[in-house]
Image: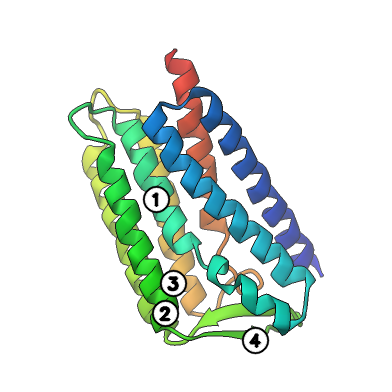
C-alpha cells in the first residue's frame, strides 16, 4: 500500500509541476519557446490523465482507448531536455527552429513505435494494470541512446561563459537519472512498473528554465 500511495503522490506532483510550467510558459516565454512548450505540456497532461485512469479504472474495455497516451514520455522528456538546453545554452547563433525538427523526428519515432510494437496490458503484483510493449528492450535502449546524446552535448557545453551552468547541470543530473531508471526498468526494478522519477526531474528542470525568463527581465 505504501508504494501505491507514493505513486499517487508522485502522479499529483507531476500534474502540479506540469500546471506550474504552463503558467510560467504563458507569462514569460518568447513566442517560439512558448509554442514548443505548450505542445509538450498538453501531451504531458494527457499522459497524466491516462495514468490516473489506468490506476483508477480496471476495465480493459476503457483502458485500450488511452493506450496511445501512456508512453508519450518517450517523446516529451527528451523534448523537455532539448528545449531547456536551448534556454540554458544562451547562444543566439543556435536557432530554436531546430527544436521543432527534433519534435517532428521524435513524433515519427513514437508513431512508428506505437504501430510496430504490440502493446499489452497485464496485472502487476499490486493487482493494477500496466501497459508494456512487446520487445520493449529495443524501444528503451533507443530512448536511452537519445538521452545519452543530449547528456553528451550538455557535458560539452558546460563551462561556456554565456551559459546557465546551474541549468545545464540540472540537465546532466536529469539525464543520468533517466538513463539509470530506464535500465533499472528493463531489469524489473521500478515503482509499480512505471518510470516517473526521471520525468519529475525533467519537469523540475523545465520549471527552472521557464522561470529564468522572468529573472532576465
Q: What residue did someone put label 2 on?
A: 115
Q: Earlier in the sequence, mark 1 or mark 4?
A: 1
Residue 128 located left or right of residue 210: right
Element type at mark 3? helix
Element type at mark 4? strand
Q: How many residues crowd around disc 4 within 10 Å: few (fewer than 14), some, or many (20 or more)? A: few
Q: Which mark is residue 183?
A: 3
Q: Which mark is residue 149?
A: none
Q: Earlier in the sequence, mark 3 or mark 4?
A: 4
How far apart are the two marked residues, 1 and 4, measured between alpha carbons? 29 Å
Are discs 2 and 1 less than 8 Å apart at CB? no
Q: What residue did someone put label 4 on?
A: 122
How far apart are the two marked residues, 2 and 1, measured between alpha carbons? 21 Å
Task: Give the label, 2 or 1, closer to the camera.
Answer: 2
Give whichever of 81, 148 is nearer the camera: 81
Task: Give the label, 4 or 2, closer to the camera.
Answer: 2
Image coords of residue 179 (percent x, y): 41, 62
How far apart are the two marked residues, 1 and 3, measured between alpha carbons? 20 Å
Task: Give the label, 3 or 4, closer to the camera.
Answer: 4
Q: What residue did someone put label 1 on?
A: 79
Extreme residue toward the left, this view? 93
Q: Earlier in the sequence, mark 4 or mark 2?
A: 2
How far apart are the two marked residues, 3 and 2, measured between alpha carbons? 24 Å
Are discs 4 and 2 less than 8 Å apart at CB? no
How many marks are shown on the rendered structure?
4
Residue 104 drawn above or below residue 142: above
Q: Residue at x 59, y 78 (%)?
A: 131
Amino acid at each position: 500500500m505504501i508504494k501505491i500511495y507514493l505513486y499517487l503522490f508522485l502522479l499529483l506532483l507531476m500534474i502540479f509541476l506540469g500546471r506550474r510550467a504552463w503558467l510560467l510558459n504563458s507569462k514569460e516565454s518568447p513566442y517560439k519557446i512558448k509554442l514548443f512548450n505548450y505542445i509538450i505540456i498538453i501531451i504531458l497532461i494527457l499522459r497524466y490523465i491516462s495514468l490516473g485512469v489506468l490506476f483508477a479504472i480496471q476495465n480493459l474495455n476503457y483502458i485500450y482507448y488511452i493506450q496511445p497516451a501512456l508512453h508519450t514520455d518517450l517523446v516529451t522528456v527528451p523534448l523537455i531536455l532539448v528545449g531547456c538546453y536551448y534556454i540554458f545554452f544562451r547562444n543566439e547563433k543556435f536557432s530554436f527552429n531546430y527544436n521543432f525538427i527534433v519534435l517532428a523526428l521524435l513524433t515519427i519515432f513514437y508513431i512508428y513505435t506505437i504501430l510496430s510494437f504490440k502493446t499489452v496490458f497485464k496485472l502487476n503484483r499490486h493487482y493494477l494494470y500496466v501497459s508494456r510493449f512487446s520487445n520493449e528492450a529495443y524501444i528503451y535502449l533507443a530512448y536511452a541512446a537519445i538521452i545519452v546524446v543530449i547528456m553528451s552535448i550538455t557535458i560539452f557545453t558546460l563551462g561556456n561563459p554565456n551559459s546557465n551552468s546551474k541549468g545545464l547541470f540540472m540537465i546532466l543530473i536529469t539525464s543520468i537519472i533517466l538513463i539509470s531508471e530506464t535500465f533499472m526498468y528493463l531489469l524489473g526494478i521500478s515503482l509499480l512498473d512505471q518510470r516517473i522519477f526521471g520525468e519529475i526531474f525533467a519537469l523540475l528542470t523545465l520549471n527552472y528554465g521557464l522561470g529564468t525568463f522572468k529573472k532576465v527581465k
